[in-house]
Image (cartoon, rainbow, N blue to C red):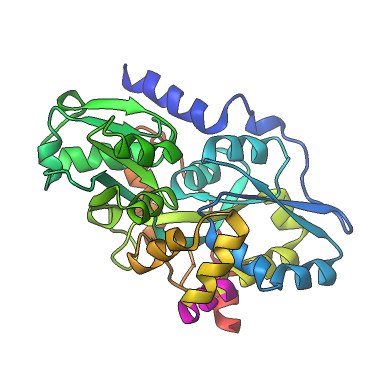
Amino acid sequence: MSRRSFTRTVIGALFGSAVACSLPLATASATDTINFGTQPATMPIYIAREMGLLDKIEKKHDVKIEFKVFSYGAPENQALAAGELQIASAGMGPAIVAAARLPAKLLAISILEQTAIIIPADSGIKSVAELKGKKIAFPGKGSQQYPLLVKALSDAGLSLDDVQLFKTKGSDVPTLLANKSVDAGITWDPHVSNALAAGTSKVLLKAEKILPIKAGHYIGNGVYAREDFIAARPELVQDLIGSIVEAIDFILANEEEAVKMWAKQIGFPEEVIRFALSEKISVYNRDVAPEASTIEAYTKFLKDADILKPDDNPKFDDSFAKKALASK
């Protein structure tokens, strides 16, 4: 596949047929429903819900905040493009591409890490270089895991021609490894922690060893919103970002209680969530502001992978995060 064809494939996977220049207004007036795109991995906003923070925001702004849950970033971005979401939390890859190609801005970096290359628990493989000739499960070329895998292989002196790629759902990677259907897999949390908690897999390489960008970690998750929504409801946006910062502070200070809250919200066993935090598969840092240097580094990563074009420049606004940090 040529670079141009690959780029079209990736962008299509991220956005489907959505056209950024002909989007309906999605500002949400008073008493309207605010549709917030989430995934099981987006822990802070779920904790904010369990803490009652979103209830307070609803009363203050006379709105109803509803979670629209997605399994990965492509349909989430399609919903944002169609005006079906006002704000979303997703993997940093989809978040950055949305900020570059849709009328949306990145507002916060909510979770670090989240991705890892994992192998069967009894595997003798000790390095990425030893994956040569092996079968590797991955969640498709439209995922942020794909360029991370490509970079990990390249850093180990391997190319895609040296391995067998097997496309699958991120949630299916643990089962494939447990059944020895593949030799390795790359996926995100809570699927990584699900495999670790089951005792069927172990970590070969964390994302922080592939692309450390912020505080020595990979940036795993971002919060982004449509520009029309930001312009129409800046105080509401401020309170939503503030709730995420407050939730992260709670996670850092009350890990065990946060485990129970997250497990209740997404329906995962507590031991899985506990692994996510104790093994630092998902890492939390209250400094959620999307600094220019961090965004530039990640943008370069996506451009090098042909996911973004050379003239694509993601839009971001760190003012909401900075104000939230200053007030907490």
- The location of residue 186, given as percent across then percent down, is 32, 41
Q: Where on the picture, by quarter, is residue 61?
A: bottom right
**Quadrant of the image containing the C terminus:** bottom right
The stretch of residues the image draws in magenta is: 246-254
Query: What residue is drawn where x is 46% and y is 61%?
Result: 273
- The location of residue 217, given as percent across then percent down, is 31, 62
Is 94 rendered above or below residue 22? below
- The location of residue 167, given as percent across then percent down, is 37, 27
Say if residue 172 shows up in the picture: yes
- The location of residue 160, given as percent across then percent down, is 21, 27
Horizontal relation, residue 31 to residue 260: left or right: right
Seen from this angle, which residue lies furthest right?
Answer: 31
Query: What residue is drawn where x is 77% and y is 45%?
Result: 26
Is 136 rendered above or below residue 207? above
Say if residue 311 shows up in the picture: no
Give the camera-side residue of 276 and 138: 276
Q: How many marks overall?
A: 0
Q: Where on the picture, by quarter, is residue 161?
A: top left
Query: What residue is drawn where x is 34% and y is 36%?
Result: 146
Horizontal relation, residue 123 to residue 74: left or right: left
**Quadrant of the image containing the N terminus:** top left
Give the camera-side residue of 201 and 308: 201
Chief secondary structure of the magenta portion: helix
Residue 252 in magenta?
yes
Residue 235 in magenta?
no
